[in-house]
Image (cartoon, grey):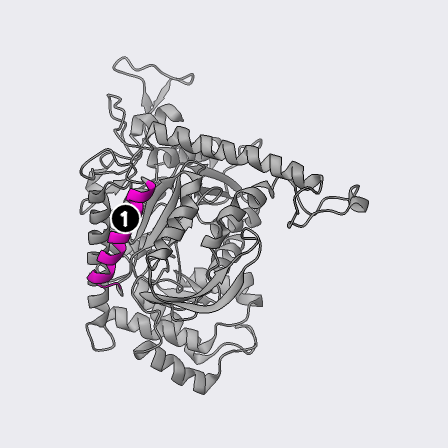
Amino acid sequence: MTESATSKLLNGDICHRTSNGKKASKNGFVKDHSLFEQPQKYRRPRDKNQNVPHNSSLYKKPFVESFEETPLWVAVLTYMGYGILTIFGYLRDFLRHWNIEKCHVARERDEQKDFVPLYQDFENFYTRNLYMRIRDNWNRPICSVPGAKVDLVERVTHDYNWTFEHTGKVVKDVINMGSYNYLGFAENTGACADAALEVTKMYGAGVGSTRCEMGNLDIHEEMEQLVARFLGVESAMAFGMGFATNSMNIPALMGKGCLILSDELNHTSLVLGARLSGSTIRVFKHNNMQSLEKLLRDAIVHGQPRTHRPWKKILIVVEGIYSMEGSIVRLPEVIALKKRYKAYLYLDEAHSIGALGPNGRGVVDYFGLDSKDVDIMMGTFTKSFGAAGGYIGGKKELIDYLRRHSHSAMYATSMSPPVAQQIITSMKIIMGEDGTTLGADRLRQLSQNTTYFRRRLHEMGFIIYGNDDSPVVPLMLYMPAKIGAFGREMLKRNIGTVVVGFPATPIIESRARFCVSAAHTREMLDTALEAISEVGDLLQLKYSRREQPLPSLGWMSEESLLQD
């Protein structure tokens, strides 16, 4: 992947003799090989992660993202809220220690105090004293298809969320703003459901073997050939679990003596896979091309620690859409850096495949790029396709290698046949191979819904993160008490939402995350928006200090340089 030590500075023309008054380094040369030139004058951006493209020639259309800075008074009150909760948490732990208050959490027995502890007391502090207060906002049981509307099983708690009891009642027709049902294929009627039913009658629900033994069905091979054609790559391979697609395949590709450059907001499956590989891991700032380029340059110049030998492989790992930020990877710039420094690129399109691009083929299609420029294309079938599992696409040599060395391929049970058929049918609909325009209509509807929903939230005065074209819409809540309050108040108005707080997000950036779907009608979105506005007024969540969304493309380059 990388060149020898004598040519670590790539392309041969990246250094020159000092001239024009430039100060030389110790060896008499001035480094001048940054792909993205730094502006001469430093300017502080009005909002974090906001500026113009570093290389606008790489973009074929406007690329607009918004990350409005947290108001100072909100940050101070948020820290105070967590501080008060922490103080009361320690007080309650003191009362539990002396059996004044009943303790529901698992603890070590006194006779085991000299053993290695199974339960780290400090690590469980947040769960005992903060998470339990708002636990009723998660794990709500659903008793219907997770489509545009869902039915929820009503439950109550009599011990402050430690346990729940079902009342036997069902909350009907809750507008679902939390599921990853981007194209509306989570349904129990229609072409996908009918095809899955027929395949279940033919093959059964399970396989009972791995692909390399007795679990390789003709429907699996048909699906993989279709996926490869959909992505525009030579070959593809499917796996039964999206999480394992990352966590089990990265170790098969990387190892000791390799370097992984990972975005700081990458999904846990990518982080776990990188750690299991045994490779050296270095993290760059989210979507910050200056931070990534600096790591690439250092890796080429200095090589491995202590020995300074060239890295065996350098792998850049990014996501298409970041599920907590709603941001889209700046793929044209990442590919330019990858080509410049001779690295490999691993692209996780779990949320972007099917949800972005004029043809629904993900972030590569969105930017109008060539799929051959991405070495490893990964994605999942759990979002836009309404199914389960994941895939990896790329060159035939790569896929053949994974079939022999991937733990997911060798030891995991094959994908269920009706799930494979759901993928085939939904993908053909997206591609228009079913003879209808249903796929194109859903893609257009998703794009329109996303634009409308984001615009209305901005107009209401909420702080919204992410790209204007991203169907993942984070609405900032900030304060810990408002996490639970927002979820409960929205459910009272028959709107199902997902709320997220620390440690899944930074401590002062708690949020509600909406997922827009093509299945949502304009009436559903208006009903949800009216409820959001009402709850926003009730909880005083309209923090935005600007009237119109501004173009946003990342940290100012010199500011990043100063931070580095």
What x and y, as percent, mark residue 380? 40, 61
Residue at the bottom extreme?
202
Q: Position of residue 167 (x, y in %)?
A: 49, 66
Q: Residue furthest right?
A: 111
Mark 1 secondary-structure assignment: helix
Question: Of residues 487 and 312, which is closer to you in this image?
Answer: 487
User: In terms of depth relative to the viewer, which is nearer, 550 or 13?
Assistant: 550
Percent position (x, y) of residue 507? 45, 37
Give the residue number, with chain letter if any, for mark 1. 534
What residue is shown at x 50% (from left), y 51% (from top)?
135
State which quadrant residue 390 falls in. bottom left
Does residue 301 appear in the picture of this structure? no
In the foreground, 430 or 339: 430
Position of the N terminus, as image quadrant, is top left
Q: 361 or 82: nearer the eye?
A: 82
* Residue at image coords 36%, 50%: 513
Q: Is residue 154 above or below residue 429?
A: above
Hey, what amino acid is under mark 1? Glu
Give the magenta part as a residue range.
520-539
Instruction: Tell me which secondary structure the magenta stretch mostly adopts.
Output: helix
Q: Is residue 522 magenta?
A: yes
| Side of 404 where 462 appears, left or right | left
Is residue 559 visible to the viewer in this orientation of the structure? yes
Task: Say left or right for 159 vs 556.
Answer: right
Query: Is the C terminus in the top left, top right, bottom left or bottom right quadrant?
Result: top left
Quadrant of the rendered image containing residue 475: top left
Residue 361, position as x, y percentages in the image: 29, 60
Give the mark count.
Answer: 1
Specify the quadrant of the image occupied by residue 196: bottom left
60 falls in the magenta region: no
Which residue is at 36% across, 60% downward? 180
Residue 329 relative to residue 135: left or right: left
